[in-house]
Image: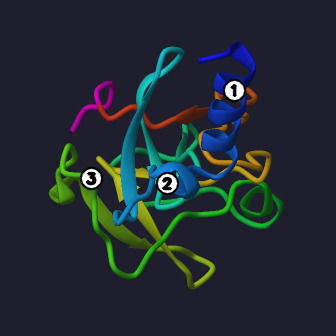
Amino acid sequence: MSYKLLTLILAALLLFPGAIGVDSTYAVNMVNSEQFGAYLTNETFFTLYRYLGDPQDDKISTCYNSCAVVWPPFYVDDLTVDPELRSRDFDVIDRDDGKKQLTYKGWPLYLYSGDNRAFETNGQAKNGVWFVVNPMNLTR
């Protein structure tokens, strides 16, 4: 296989994961990367993040207003999780703005508005307080 063809296939996989058979029936997936190891994504493979400003296990989100525009809270009504994850590690919190948000091992989950394609991790270590959710490195 030529380098050019391989590059095109990989680019298509990143831009259109469903077109090459990378599809999900799960609302939350666990994917792997060389850089971060295992991390969580939503059903379309957009990365999920946690915010160190949120107190773990207090069922409180502290990201509102302009913060929530940049870091939208993640929530789905019908939670299905990758078989490598345990559904009991997820919970739902009621936010002060009246919305719901999913948590993982006590950490509220967010998307990042700066991620424009599946598998992007542009929010990683943003301002030293936003991190991809690595299920292997969280305690509870």
**How far apart are labels 1 and 3 at the CA level?**
31 Å
Q: Residues within 10 Å of mark 3 (few under 14, many from 20)?
A: some
Q: Earlier in the sequence, mark 1 or mark 3?
A: 1
Q: Are marks 3 and 2 in contact (CB under 8 Å)?
A: no
Rendering coords of residue 63 (x, y %): 66, 57
Residue in the image at 54% along x and 15% along y: 35
Give the numbered dot on residue 82: 3
Apparent side of residue 90 relative to residue 95 in the rendered image (left or right): left
Kind of residue indicated by mark 2: Leu
**How far apart are labels 2 and 1 at the CA level?**
37 Å
Rendering coords of residue 106 (x, y %): 33, 50
The residue identified by callout 1 is 5
In the image, residue 13 above or below residue 7: below
Give the numbered dot on residue 109: 2
| Residues drawn in magenta | 136-140
137 part of magenta stretch = yes
Q: Earlier in the sequence, mark 3 or mark 2?
A: 3
Q: How many marks?
A: 3
The secondary structure type at the circle numbered 1 is: helix
Residue in the image at 57% along x and 56% along y: 19
The secondary structure type at the circle numbered 2 is: loop
Q: Nearer the viewer, mark 1 or mark 3?
A: 1
The secondary structure type at the circle numbered 3 is: loop
In the image, residue 80 above or below residue 50: below
Apparent side of residue 65 relative to residue 54 in the rendered image (left or right): right
Q: Main secondary structure of the magenta part?
A: loop
